[in-house]
Image: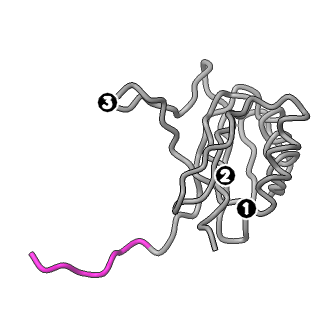
Amino acid sequence: MMKSATAVKRIDCVYLPATNTEESANWYMDYLGLRLKRPVHEHQAQLEISPEQSIFLIKSKEPRNVNYTEINGTEQCILTMEVGSFEELYSKMKENGAHISDIEDNGDCGHNFYAYDPAGNKIDIWSGWPK
């Protein structure tokens, strides 16, 4: 089989479970600066990262998150977000009592920390590639 160009152009939406769509939407807006695409509905919140990318928070029947355990026993997340003002965001989240990990120095891969949204979804918050 010949290798061809990928058919995928970009990831448009990521769907995350939410126990309380309004609480979760507020978390993403307050900490990460995401904007509502339309008013929050009890079953769904649509948040815009950019005009081309969105996060949809979908109310689940029972409390769930999308974290999973790697073969070595480490809890893994499905989403990494590169942020500007990495240190400021970390300080803001820590000062406001958000559930976050310590900052990790990954050398050539930059810095990151993990944040948990109100539903317990683990999000990798990344500084970007070192300059």
70 left or right of 96 in image: left
Q: Position of residue 73 (x, y in %)?
A: 39, 25
Q: Where is residue 85 in the image (x, y as percent from the top left)?
A: 81, 60
Identify the image quadrant of the C terminus.
bottom right
Q: Residues within 10 Å of mark 2 (few under 14, many from 20)?
A: many
- Label whose residue precedes the other's in the sequence (1 or 2): 1
Three-letter residue code for mark 1: Ile
Three-letter residue code for mark 2: Ile
What is the spatial separation of the Cα atoms under label 3 and label 1, in whole angstroms?
A: 31 Å
Q: What stretch is highlighted in magenta?
A: 1-8
Q: Tags 1 and 2 in contact by the CB under 8 Å rule?
A: yes
Residue occupied by mark 1: 49
Q: In which quarter of the image is residue 90?
A: top right
Q: Tags 3 and 1 in contact by the CB under 8 Å rule?
A: no
Look at 68% across and 42% down and name the residue there: 103
Residue occupied by mark 2: 55
- Label whose residue precedes the other's in the sequence (3 or 1): 1
3 in magenta: yes
Vertical position of residue 107 compared to residue 103: above or below: below
Residue occupied by mark 3: 71
Identify the image quadrant of the N terminus.
bottom left
- Magenta part, dominant SS: loop
Nearer the camera: disc 2 or disc 3: 3
Three-letter residue code for mark 3: Ile
Label 2 residue SS: strand
